Image (cartoon, grey):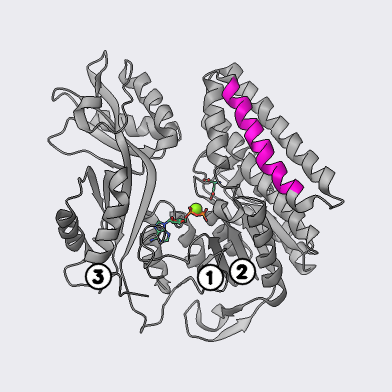
Amino acid sequence: MIVHKFGGTSVANAQCFANVATIVIEQQKKGRPVISKIKNGGQSSGQSAPLEGAIVVVSAMSGVTDLLISGARAAAEGKDTVCREIKATLLSKHLNVVETLLGHSPERLEVAGHVEDRLHDLELLYRSIAVLGELTLRGCDAVASFGEQLSAGLLAAVLRENGARAQAFSATELIVTDSNFGAARPRMDVTHERLEQRVRPLLDRSAIPVITGYIAANEQGVTTTLGRGGSDYTAAIVGAGLGADEVWIWTDVDGILTADPNIVPEAKTLAELSYSEAAELAYYGADVLHPKTIRPVTESGIPLRILNTFSPTNPGTLIVKSPRPDRKVSPAIISTTGLTLIAVGTEDDSWTLADAVRALQLLSEAGVDALLFSQSFSEHSLNLVVREQSQAHCLHVLSREFGGSVSQSESVPSKRSRTLTKNGYVLGTKEKVATISVVGVPGWDETGIISHAFAALGKCRTRVIAVAQSGTEYAVSFCIPEDHVEETVRFLHRELGLEGQHG
Ligand code: ADP
Ligand code: ASP
Ligand code: MG
């Protein structure tokens, strides 16, 4: 049995839902030769056996989770109109799928009614947040969970419309976590039991379970989430819990490539990676694979594939315990945009490490992911890279602790955008940024990838704002101005000689 996970881009609109349904039905019928882990413990050997059975894990439609969370934040600030507009956008986005794909289905009214009911519940939740005037992490998870619940319901209906027996499941009934809202950790023992009790019987009847990605619930049944981009992790948890033969992550590119192919069209797919190589890539690439995905599959020796929903016959990237010894190894560049740089500090030298710890603690409690942070000895401030969508929330949280109003000047480098707050602290956004991570592999070059990456960046004359290096010395992340990301990625790809490489 194979767990198929479809990301937000794979279910971006009605056409994409139809495409996903075709893939799932084909895969369920014929299966595709998969590596026999029983024979060799996840080792790539070329031996294969066709296997049947499919479980689907699905993300929210592209952009929906961002919208839901912005609505929750707007509700907390009393911006009622924003919440109403968001609800209307979500309604038309999801109903469009119903009208386009289920227009003649006997289920049409029921499915449309379900979408409307769920969005009515969302409206009520927004109102409660508005009354409270604050958004807790628990409230944020409750709001964020709507996206996957809607998409799973739609996909199951589209599959049924295409002749498959499919049933949607909310992972709040299947995956049991602790109460660490925003980044909950699964309890595999109870989760395993629930998957066996509720999902296994469907598989035995050759039906297709369609499970919500990203969301779960604690032991009291309160909704939690696994962290942004967490549907990949859900697929790995489900795969490990049910002893899947393989876990396939379907996305919008041909696997993990030497660079984002949207920027470098000639980038090559890394055909095979080991679990530890993939973990390093995932850890430094915020998007391409959720970093926690690797552990559950590693523990069970389950092969993982990254495949392209829009080019399903492409072999993609295979991640196994022991890749073929004769494969070519190659570094990869992972780039992430849509980020912003925030600085908090003091004008004089009174900024201490304890202040930095306090700032990071506050952000963690407020559910803001700092994708990268840096503090040098000479600077009296902490630089934080957060998603642009979290910028206002992040400034709000920090300004409560560090006092005063904050400046929000975009694209203004360095100190000019800073504001002196009343307590002597300085807080402000600096500019829109991107991160570029260069992740190497052991044995690629004696001196390692990091010195090559620095040399290449020097030649490219890119302004580097912050740097973070991995302890393994195989990876380095640079924070650069967002408008330089494409030329820098293209330059690095050429300069590091990745054009001729392939896995
Ligand atoms: P999904 O919606 O399927 O979860 P994501 O947007 O989270 O997809 O991740 C896939 C995206 O990662 C690609 O569309 C691509 O823009 C980006 N990406 C950045 N660097 C790379 C890389 N080296 N290889 C593949 N994808 C990359
Ligand atoms: N929908 C969630 C997010 O946007 C989870 C995911 O897409 O993997 O973060
Ligand atoms: Mg993703």
- Tell me which label, 2 or 3, sits earlier in the chain: 2
Q: Residue 497 carries which label?
A: 3
Q: In this view, does 45 lie above or below 68?
A: below
Q: Is mark 3 on a helix, strand or loop?
A: loop
Q: What residue type is labelled 3?
A: Gly
Q: How crowded is mark 3: few (under 14 residues within 10 Å), some or many (20 or more)?
A: few
Q: Is mark 2 on a helix, strand or loop?
A: loop
Are the residues tagged 1 and 2 within 8 Å (C-beta)? yes
**Residue name at image x 84 percent, y 53 percent:** 105
Q: Is residue 406 visible?
A: yes
Image side of residue 410 versus residue 393, left or right: left
Q: In which quarter of the image is residue 389?
A: top left
Measuring 64% from the left and 37% from the top, which residue is drawn there? 90
Figure quadrant of the C terminus: bottom left
Q: Magenta region: which residues?
A: 81-99
Distance between the alpha carbons at the discs numbered 1 and 3: 32 Å
